[in-house]
Image (tube, helix red, strand yellow):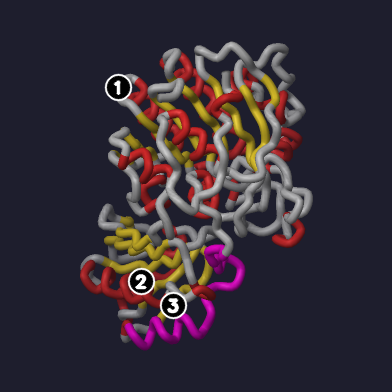
Amino acid sequence: MGNYKRIFTIVIDSLGAGALPDAADYGDAGTDTLGHISQSMDTFTIPNLQKLGMANLHPLKQVAPAEKPLGYFSYLNEASTGKDTMTGHWEMMGLHITTPFQTFTETGFPKELLDELSRRTGRTIIGNKSASGTEILDELAEEEIATGHMIVYTSADSVLQICGNEETFGLDELYRCCEIAREITMKDEWKVGRVIARPYTGKKKGEFKRTSNRHDYALKPYGKTALNALQEAGLDVISVGKIYDIFDGEGLTESNKSKSSVHGMEQTIDIAKRDFKGLCYVNLVDFDALWGHRRNVLGYAKELEKFDEKLGELMGLLQDDDLLILTADHGNDPTHTGTDHTRERVPFIAWSPSMKGCGRLDDAQTFAVIGATIADNFGVSMPQGTIGSSILEKLG
């Protein structure tokens, strides 16, 4: 078996660290989520990331490189095609995505898709744009209640979302329409990562509230991942945040939903106080959902500072046989045009209290070194058809 009993892999959702060589093909030349946040702020305080070596890896205006960083660090380049959450996470765990999931952020869904959805559900569609869930309800829910029309919208992720009032539309009908939408969006040109049922209550603007009866119709990974390999070997695979949705539950032994990124870190801290053997896999989505897509530099910077405080708490709990991995799944430069993700490399930081060495590692050409390294640590073979090679021996 390997060196570590527990591995905590934390994905700071969208914390890119510079444009990939093909970024211009995505309209993302010159992007740098972390660097541009630092450049835009008067103050930026991340002492625990600083100690681990973040500023040694990626120069930051306000943060000096650590004289003796605690961790090992490098950049990971994305081998897959795309720049969305599912592609990034699936690649981390060994899958190479060559057909990207579709996003419809800027254009809305094509007429052909909506015509088929309308015909098969028997409902007129309203909305068809990128919007936040609360905004779309304030704008269109009164019309939906009055007419029976169906609100369909998207976000900057690869999703198709349908709203339904629980009293007038009905949960069963909402789920039926979403199942039809999931079937329609299996076509390659329309393939979205998730169809989401968004039920709500209320009768007029200002009173609408989304309920806990949300249901996600996610794509399952097209093959087995490192998570499946760990689970099948009898190890614990504990998820925090969006991980369950991203993998549709595949390969997980326990799932914890988070209310926020701070809550996700609090859950991770609680898990660190428990005895388990295996992986705790965490996604912290607020960086992306609340700040990156909304192009809010200040909000993103403050969220990183809050994360850094919780990171310090977590580091204080880790034992010699624990390994911490920090990374991201794509970029979302809040200084860039538009509202979409950005095609960027991501940081990789690894640390354990028992490490004797530290410093810069060679950059990797795939995020999949993460899953391969985790599997190697536990003496588990990666599933057939996966990519990535372990760097465990370099983390001494």
Q: Nearer the viewer, residue 367 or 383?
A: 383
Horizontal and vertical percent for residue 87?
53, 54
Q: Residue at x 24, y 74 (%)?
A: 173
Is 110 drawn above or below residue 54 in the view shown? below
Q: How many marks?
A: 3
In-image side of 112 versus 45 (left or right): left
In the picture of the structure, the residue carrying the numbered disc 2 is 142
Magenta stretch holds residue 103: yes
Q: Looking at the rendering, in which quadrant would you find the C terminus? A: top right
Horizontal and vertical percent for residue 274?
30, 22
Q: In the drawing, what numbered circle is on residue 126? A: 3
Q: Nearer the viewer, residue 225 or 139?
A: 225
Magenta segment, which residues?
A: 99-120
Which quadrant would residue 140 be assigned to in this image?
bottom left
Horizontal and vertical percent for residue 168?
23, 72
Q: Amino acid at mark 2?
A: Glu
